[in-house]
Image: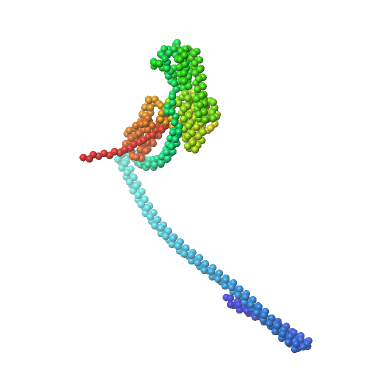
Amino acid sequence: MPYPLLAETTLNAMTVLGVAIGVIAGIIVGVIGLTLVSNRGLRQSRIEAERITVDARAKAETHARVIEVEAEKKALERRQALDKEVAESVAEVKRSQERAAKREEMLDRKLEQIGQRETKLEQQEERLDKAEEKLKTAHAESESLHMQLRDRLAQTARLTEAEARAIYLDEVRASSQQDAAKVTQSIIEEAETKARERAREITLMAIQRYAAENVSDSTIRTVKIPSDDMKGRIIGREGRNIRAIEKATGADILIDDTPGVISVSCFDKVRQTIAAETLQKLVADGRVHPSRVEELVEQTKRDVHERIQKAGADAVTELGLRGLHPKVVEAMGRLHFRTSYGQNVLKHSIEVAYLSQMIADQLGLNGQIARRAGFLHDIGKAMDHEIEGGHPAIGMDFLRKFGEKSEPVLNAVGGHHADIPSTTPYTPIVMAADAVSGARPGARRESMELYIKRLEQLEAIAKAQPGVTEAYAIQAGREVRVIVDARRLDDATTFVVARDIAKRVEEEMTFPGEIKVTVLREVRAEATAR
């Protein structure tokens, strides 16, 4: 391709050279002609013409060589450019061929993979067809067996189809409950273990850090007299003295055949204290008549009121509480004369305050709020004999009336017996502290009659469960040991029995603290070798 182009360039150069020679020759002829016409030295003209011709030829040849060199240079550049274009075209062709080869190879691999997938799909379809056939066969067999069992059950038991279905569902439900009981028990055990460890740690820490006296002194219920003659003087003529005492104090004076004792009965412990101390002063003074009774009652009321205010103020100072209304302080002081199962309510409130603060501190909450809520949680007991309703609701309304604005404190007071929903974490803290204070050993006492009745009720609830053979209340009613029939119940079902007993105890009984339910299942195998 480049060689014809070179020849064409050379031909053009020769043509230009010829034209130049022709032009030069014409010039020479013209000069000679002029020389001949003018008759000026023909020889000289010839010499001049030859010189001019030689110079023209030399210039023409030089010009021709320059043109030829430039033509060759352009031809060489053109050739190099064409060679570069050819090389690039060849390289591009090679790259295209390589890409085509790679694509072809990829297509071959994809075709191979598609072929393998088609093979696998065919095999899977075959397996699915076989599985479907087996499933249909099994379903048909199951239907047939179900029909046979239903017919047999109906024929044997002479039951209707609905009754047979109910029996069948009961059997399925029973087997499912066993499996569910195992799974539920494993989950509950894991959660209870973690929660119990943390709760035990916090509770034991709080009890160890705050150890108050075991049983508080109860308020006075009897008054000793030096002789039985004093009973007559207390009663007075036609009972005027005893009526004056009862009217002034609001308490009942009980005089019976018990030697050396006069009993004072009143639900309001403050009134009971006023009546008992008035009787003591009357006995010591010896002058018993209505006017003297009224005088001593007023004096005793002032003394008791001062003691109430002092008891409330001392408790508030001990706990470091601020911002309490004087009526609230006085109400807390009245709890000094109130007992619950032998436990002084004011001391119980102080104990709950400290326990609540310790628990809240361990949980990263505000100990000041917890201590305030724990101290005020039973304030409703100071006036629950005068206002209708439970002491949690009475206490919450009383605190709100006298300026208590802390919602955690109000909710804890109103909800520490679960009468209202807990809206803050301080309510369950106070509930736990209240239970710890009342359930710790020696904190409370109860009558033997109520104690025996509670133990009997606890054993009766346990024995009412299916499969239970024996039940024994131990540790002063803090635990009940239950023995079940190993032939009727398995290990998983014993956990269900324990939870059912605990649930019924929570719903049907009232008790301080907690009661542990332990269910025992034992299988004994005996054999005699002779």
Please say if 326 is above or below 172: above
Q: In this orientation, which residue lies closer to the viewer: 363 or 286?
A: 286
Residue 125, image x, y percentages: 40, 56
- Colour mode of the rendering: rainbow
Q: In this orientation, which residue lies closer to the viewer: 446 or 178?
A: 446
Quarter of the picture containing the C terminus is: top left
State the residue lying farthest toward the bottom.
43
Please say if 385 is above or below 498: above
Q: Residue at x 52, y 28 (%)?
A: 317
Residue 247, image x, y percentages: 48, 16
Quarter of the picture containing the N terminus is: bottom right
Q: Residue at x 50, y 32 (%)?
A: 371
Please say if 470 is above or below 132: above
Asked if one can make out residue 217 in the rendered structure from this viewpoint, the answer is: yes
- How many dots with numbers? 0
Residue 189, image x, y percentages: 40, 40
Q: Residue at x 47, y 14 (%)?
A: 285
Residue 258, image x, y percentages: 39, 16
Q: In this orientation, which residue lies closer to the viewer: 101 or 151?
A: 101
Left or right, 407 with respect to 341, comes to right
State the residue lying farthest toward the top.
237
Q: Residue at x 46, y 13 (%)?
A: 286
Q: Quadrant of residue 236?
A: top left
Asked if one can make out residue 421 in the rendered structure from this viewpoint, the answer is: no
Left or right, 366 with respect to 505, comes to right
